[in-house]
Image (spheres, rainbow, N blue to C red):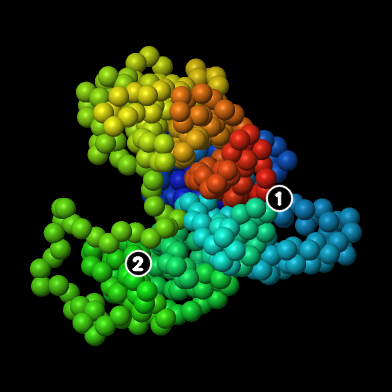
Amino acid sequence: MVKAIVVTCPHCNARLPVATNATQVKCEYCGTQAHVQRRTGIFERPMPPPPSMGINPNVMFAVQRPSKVLLNIIVLAAVLPIAIGLVVCVVVAKTTTGGLFGGATEWQGTGSMVFADIDGDGTKEVLGRSRGFSPDAIRVIALDAKTGKVRWQSEPLGTYGDTYQGPLAIAKDLVLFGAPDSGEVRAFGLADGKLRWKATLDERVKHFCDGGPATVIALGNDDRERPLQRATGNAASPAAKAQEAAPPKTPPPQTDQKVCPALPSDVIDRAADWNRGLEFEVRDKLDVSSEKVYDGASGKVIAATRKTGSRVPVLVAIDGAQQQRWRAVVPIKPLGAPEQAPEPVVVGDREVCAAYYAKSITDDAMQIACFAASDGKRLWDQTGPVDSSLRALEIQGRTLFVGSNGHLQARALDTGAVIWTYGGR
């Protein structure tokens, strides 16, 4: 009988069972092909792959992680059985998910986060998704942006596989979620996270739009708008309901299609594809490879690698005429870093921050560096959460929020110091 281990997909963070002798894995959820990282044992560090594998540096690693919760339970059971009950009580008291071994929750780091004032005090809280593991359950979660304290968690949305591709958006006093597997839309109260209504559509939701004081709009993958009553979730009018029930006589145009603007969501990619932003001659002039262009309060910033010589990760700020304003080499030791563009990147009004690997894409933690938006001067460089996959950076006020596989951190934008951390089993 072949034994199995569990690894984490480096793209979507899904848990994947593989045989212990497997060297490659393909994620059943997002299709990412990855190498399988080895470990020498439950107490040991990851093992580097043998040279005979012929590792492709452009392919990411699926990471095998020992369960710290299981290890702690085994030790406590062997030393003091009554401690098991005490630990479980503490874990359950600090979370709202409950469960004997599943009380602790993680930050679901496949998307970003959104910000909203949930109690009307003028200060925005941070919202996103939490994940429990016994059983696998995804919930909407609201955290106090200053302390990281849980303000509320919703009822379960479903498993990770059921929900990770569905949009989560803020619509004034509602939090909306569109289930990708069923066309179901759920609305939760922004103030308390309680379910307000459910509605079932005949198409997956691409994103949500503001339809006015009494209406929200679910835009389907077919680019058709489906108005829903904000109070009940019913179709906003008989005409809208009839339109939803019957397919259009002619398909919507495939180009230059005007759609309603998306509400704040945790799945929006804030980077534009390079080919939509710059011409080939501009790339050559700037001496960068084709990557992504980020737009923010202080302008456009390219996240790329140097085109000539060693492909060193760089950030290049450009003006409206696509001329270079400044250039910053991102790694502190540029020749020792992987030849991979910084990602994610966030452009604020005073800082531009980026994540990068310092030595290897199998590192347990990425580095976070922030630069002055005015001239590209390096302000600070700190190690990020120990998760191997950092997925989102957002600036809110003078705080940098860092979302990764399992953790959400709030950091002081001036220094990079950690203010609080949520998640981690």
**Real-space CA distance between mark 2 and mark 1, rounded to the nearest whole angstrom:** 43 Å
Q: Position of residue 262 (x, y in %)?
A: 34, 59
Which secondary structure, mark 2? Answer: strand
Marks 2, 1: nearer the viewer: 2
Using the image, determine if residue 23 lies above or below residue 288.
Answer: below
Q: How many marks?
A: 2
Residue at 58% x, 43% y is 398
* Foreground residue among 90 and 196: 196
Using the image, determine if residue 315 lies above or below residue 95.
Answer: above
Using the image, determine if residue 379 lies above or below residue 60.
Answer: above
Q: Position of residue 277 (x, y in %)?
A: 26, 36
Residue at the outermost front position: 122
Would residue 339 be seen by someone viewing this image from the given angle?
A: no
Residue at 50% x, 29% y is 372
Q: Position of residue 228 (x, y in %)?
A: 33, 77
Q: Quadrant of residue 83?
A: bottom right
Residue identifier under label 1: 68
* Foreground residue among 138 and 283: 283
Residue at 58% x, 72% y is 192
